[in-house]
Image (cartoon, rainbow, N blue to C red):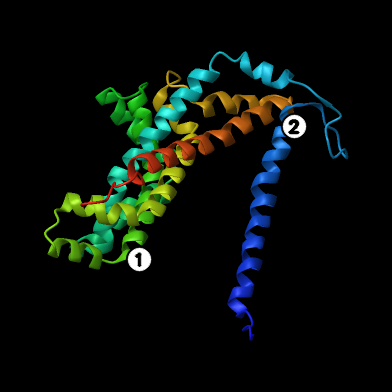
Amino acid sequence: MFVSPARPEQQEKPILTNGIKIFVLLFFCLPFAILLLQSFSAGWQWPRLLPGTFSWRAWQSLSREPRMIPAISITLLIGLAVSLINLILGIPAGKGLAHYRFRGKSLVEAVFLLPLLIPTLAVVMGIHIFMIRVGLTNTVWGVILVHVIPTLPYTIRIFRHAFENLGSKWEEQAATLGASQLTIYRTVWLPLLIPSIHSALMLSFVISLSQYALTAIIGGGNVVTLAMVYFPYFQSSNRSVLACFTVIFALLPLSFYLLMYSLYKLFIRGPGHYRGC
C-alpha cells in the first residue's frame, strides 16, 4: 500500500509546537521554579545549583506581616473591578472604532491613546485634584477608577483589532433574522470574542496589580494593595523574603485566570447555553 509522504507544513508543526514548549519552559516555568527554591532556601550561594539548606523562615516572616491578607484581598477586588470595567467600556468602544465611521474619529482615537503617550504621574496629579473635590480620594472606588486609566487603552485596542478581523457580516446576518442588539452581543459576539476577552482581562489585571504610585497617590495610604506592601521590602537584604513576595505576585494572576476560566466554563460553556437562541 502506498503511503503519501508527509507535507512540509505537517512536519514543521511538531517542530514549532516543541519550540513553543521549550520557550515557555525556559522563560516562564524555569524562573518561577528558581524563585520557589529561593523562597525556601536558608542560603544559596554561587555557584551551587541547589540551595545548601532549606527553611520555612522566609514564609514564616511573611506570615507575620499583618497587612498581607487584607492587601491580597483588596488587590483581587480592585483587579476584578478594573477588569470588568475595562470589558464594559472596551467592547463597545472597540466595536465603534472598528465598524463605524464618524466625524472626529481620529480625535477620539487620539484621546483613547493619551494615557499611553502622557506620563501617568502627570495625568494623576490633575485627576488627584478632581478626586479630592468629588470625595473619591482615600477610597477603593477612587483607586479602581484611576487604575482604569492605564488599562483601558490596551483593552480598546484589543477589541478594536478583534472586531476588525471578525467584520460586520455576522451581525448583519443575525439582524436579518430579527435578533436584537442584546441577543447579537450574547449569541454572536460573545463566543467569537472569548480569546480577546481572556487577553483583555489578564492584561488589565496584571497592569492593575503592578500599580504602586497611582495607588499611593489616590489611595493616600488608606487603600493598601499588595504592591504597596511589596515595594518597601526591596530595601531588605533577605532575598528569600523577596522571593516569597514574588511568588505570591506570580500566583495572583494565575489564580485570577483560573477563576475567570472556571466562570467561563460554568456560565458560558455550560450545556445548552446557546441552544434555542
Q: Residues within 10 Å of mark 1 (few under 14, many from 20)?
A: few
- Counting from the top left corner in percent of width and height, residue 72 is at 50, 24
- The local secondary structure at tag 1 comes to helix
- The local secondary structure at tag 2 comes to helix
Q: Is residue 167 above or below residue 211?
A: below
**Residue to which mark 2 is pinned:** 38
The image quadrant that residue 12 belongs to is bottom right
User: Which numbered circle lies on residue 64?
Assistant: none
The image quadrant that residue 88 belongs to is top left
Whether residue 216 can be seen here:
no
Q: Residue at x 64, y 86 (%)?
A: 2
- Give amino acid for label 1: Asn
User: Which numbered circle lies on residue 165?
Assistant: 1
In the image, 158 versus 196, the foreground residue is: 196
Q: Is residue 72 left or right of residue 242?
A: left
- Give amino acid for label 2: Gln
Q: Is residue 240 above or below residue 148?
A: above
Q: Is residue 41 left or right of residue 170?
A: right
